[in-house]
Amino acid sequence: MNDHSKLLDQLRIDRTVEAASRSTIWPWLLICGLLVAGAIGAYIRWSGDTPITVRSATARALNPETTAASVLDASGYVVARRQATVSSKVTGKVTEVLIEEGQAVRQGDVLARIDDSNARAQLALAQSQLQAARTQLTEINVQLAEAERQLRRTRELSDRQLVSDQALDSAQASVDGLKARLATTRSNVVVAERSVAVQQQQLDDTVVRAPFDGVITIKNAQPGEMISPLSAGGAGTRTGIGTLVDMRSLEVEVDVNENFINRVESGQKVTARLNAYPDWRIPAGVIAVIPTADRSKATVKVRIGLDVEDPRILPEMGVRVSFMDAAAQSPEPQAVGAGVLIPAEAVHDGEVFVIDAGHVERRAVVTGGSDGTDMIVMSGLRRGERVAIGALSELSDGAKVQVTD
């Protein structure tokens, strides 16, 4: 009996074990579900929902003058064809300096004054000598007039045989001698007048004046310093008051590699860009190609004239120029709006990515010339549309982007 009961107990199903196993499986199922959901979310995130950070540029209207392509780019500097280190003509001590850097001056304006005490003393001496010569001239004129009257009386008496011929000859000699002294004294007066003019010029030279209109760029001297037109060989002697630059004579000088100088000719149109203002296109033209080469650098110097005058253009500024191909220009200028201008880095394999509502659209474009910075787009893009700049290789049609400045 007992044996049968034990057998029946072995055949009975234990419900407590099944319940325990079920309570152990559910947490693992929950963890697996969360992992699958995370994987799906990561896939969705990395498959295009995460925006790609790019920069943007706006397509702007094309100026008809920029339709020509660049045949050569070069770098150079702004230089002034007319500038001078202003100095005095005489050596002396500076008593007054009336200029500062950045000051605009006109021709003839007083820039500085040199100690003029010695020059004034020399002028006073020359004026006294002139006065003495003129006084002597007046005295000789009076003596000559008296001698001529005496000669006339002697001649009348000689005609009447009342005086000897010797007396007549003596009166004539006196007149001739006074005439010779008069001529010498007149010459002395002229010499004295010229001496006064020289001393007056010496006095005027102690005042330093501007030789032409311009702007002071460097101030070299201070009151109390010695200044000389020539180097005196000492550290305490200046050779100039300051540097004056004629801002109307500014132009650009560039060194062109001699291998490409055949692309440059006199009168050729040029677009210049200052390094300080890279977005400012300055119309310019080639003035001349200097007919000599620098053997050490294998370059040829080219002078470029600027077509505009602007206070932003300063001497010694760095500038980049693009020599335009006149033959590539259309016979008839294109109308504004026929093309647009965008940064060259926005074009990738003949395509651009147009930004619209946080996404990009891949679009093929037809490009024209480039100056190395900007690209002319002749078709495929409208004025005002924004294009992506940056990680273009990571973009695809419809990709989500985030635009930064």
Image: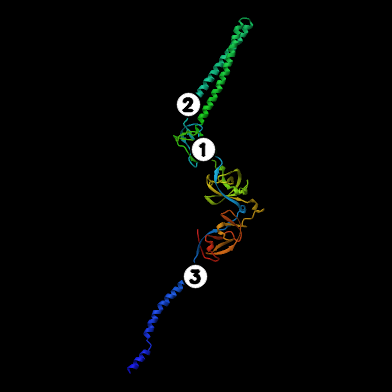
What residue occupies the far front of the structure in this picture? 295
In front of the other: 15 or 251: 15
User: For residue 121, which numbered disc appears in the image?
Assistant: 2
Q: Disc 3 versus disc 2: distance between alpha carbons?
A: 98 Å
Q: Identity of the amino acid at label 2?
A: Ala
What residue occupies the far right of the structure in this picture? 331
- Answer with the quarter of the image where residue 292 lies: top right
What residue occupies the far left of the structure in this picture? 2
User: For residue 44, which numbered disc appears in the image?
Assistant: 3
- Answer with the quarter of the image where residue 35 lies: bottom left
- Residue matched to label 1: 85
The residue sitting at 52% across, 29% down in the picture is 201
Position in image of residue 217 (x %, y %): 50, 41
Q: Identity of the amino acid at label 1?
A: Thr
Q: Identity of the amino acid at label 3?
A: Ile
N-term mark: 1 or 2: 1
Quick check: marks 3 and 2 in contact, CB under 8 Å? no
- Disc 3 is placed on an element classified as helix
